Image: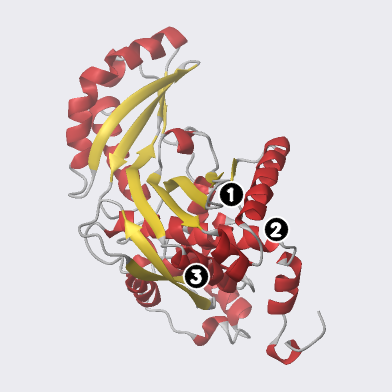
Amino acid sequence: MSLPVRKTSGKFQQVTKNLKEITAHPIDSAKVRIENPIGCVQVPVGLAGPLWVWETGATGEEVEEVYAPLATTQAALVASCCRGCKAFNRSGGIHIVALRDAMSKVPAFIFDSPADALAFAQKVPSLQGELKRLAESTSRRIQLLSVTPTVVGSAAHLHFNYNCGDATGQNMATIATDRACHELLLDTPLCEDLKIRDYQFEAGMSGEKKAGWSHVQEPRGVEAMAWGMISNEVAEELLGCSTEAIYQTLSRAQAGSVRAGEFGYAGNAMNVVTAIFIATGQDVASISESCWTQLTPEYNYETKVLTLSLYIPSLPVGVVGGGTHLGPQREALGIMKCIGPGKKRRLAALITAFALALDLSTAGAIANDTFTQAHAGLRRKPADATAKL
């Protein structure tokens, strides 16, 4: 061990010597793929459900009963999600569907002038076959769907769009794109022929770990939608308000969100997205790419039935790779029946369904003005449960 390494190791030992909780749980270094591991931080997991779902495109017509593990320290989240599940169940359940599925990387090629960048962009279609061959040689799971150029000044950004099987695919797409770019465009005579002067692997257009309109136009992850109907009788019995009151509450909130310039509109869908991401070993920072959501309320004044649909255009999730191989996270995926080939799309659709259930319950609590009371009561310690609210 070199002297600088010994000094760093000694400093780490000084920092961790008095830790009891973080270091209480041993780490299997063969499974945990992080640097400088010192232990684990536990997050409580609550079980939401049961929720009845109808999976569009699945074989058979029977409703399926599902549950979701929510890793959170937030009181009222699990209880509210369960209440929403119960209300939807009493009204027939939630329909779910996974739509498009993609992962992207967007490197930039720099030229001496915009004219050279435009000339390069025009030649990209003729290069796609070889780019596809090189990119797909890096993994048996990856498939290059398209390469689309965008010229910004003297730079041409190439949007590589992939299907990554059951993996989320960020690292997979990174490795594939890097090989294709270097072996065809950068480390060959083509670099000079195409007048490429420089290269920047990440130049801002991929939107990774960032909120952006690009994730609405083209999914970075799985595009999913969930919808269900609530009868007035169920709303009054379980949510303490009418379906019209919920509809008016959501309509006013939508108008307010437009004035505030919010990015999309939903209640608090990201609470569920984050909780399931943590529980199932997803890259939690990727929730920033999922934050644009659209909750659509539709009310029938004759039947008093409220239809709610939630659309999430980008959910970067996977059921292989990342933290999904760890024991607790694997069990969490098992709870949702999301282990096995083709289950990534199911996971995204189920996340959307439970987020919709939470939004219904939250809207009901706001409509009848019990939102604050519920949080004040449920956040208390067990010994304080009988304290005056």
How packed mark 3 is, by other alpha carbons closer than 10 Å (few <14, some 14-19, many 20 or more), is: many
How packed mark 1 is, by other alpha carbons closer than 10 Å (few <14, some 14-19, many 20 or more), is: many
Given the image, on which type of amino acid does mark 2 rest?
A: Ala
Residue drawn at x 39%, y 11% as measured from the top left: 118
How far apart marks 2 and 3 lie (CA) works out to 18 Å
Given the image, on which type of amino acid does mark 1 rest?
A: Ala
Residue 3, can we see it? no
Which numbered circle lies on residue 266?
1
Question: Which badge, 2 or 3, is on the more N-terminal residue?
Answer: 3
Question: Residue 342, position in %: x, y?
Answer: 24, 56
Q: Mark 2 points at which residue?
A: 367
Question: Which badge, 2 or 1, is on the more N-terminal residue?
Answer: 1
Q: Mark 3 points at which residue?
A: 86
Between 183 and 6, the one lying in front of the other is 183
Given the image, on which type of amino acid does mark 3 rest?
A: Lys
Between 372 and 188, the one lying in front of the other is 372
Residue drawn at x 37%, y 62% as measured from the top left: 53
Question: Tag 3's secondary structure?
Answer: helix
Q: In which quarter of the image is residue 64?
A: bottom left
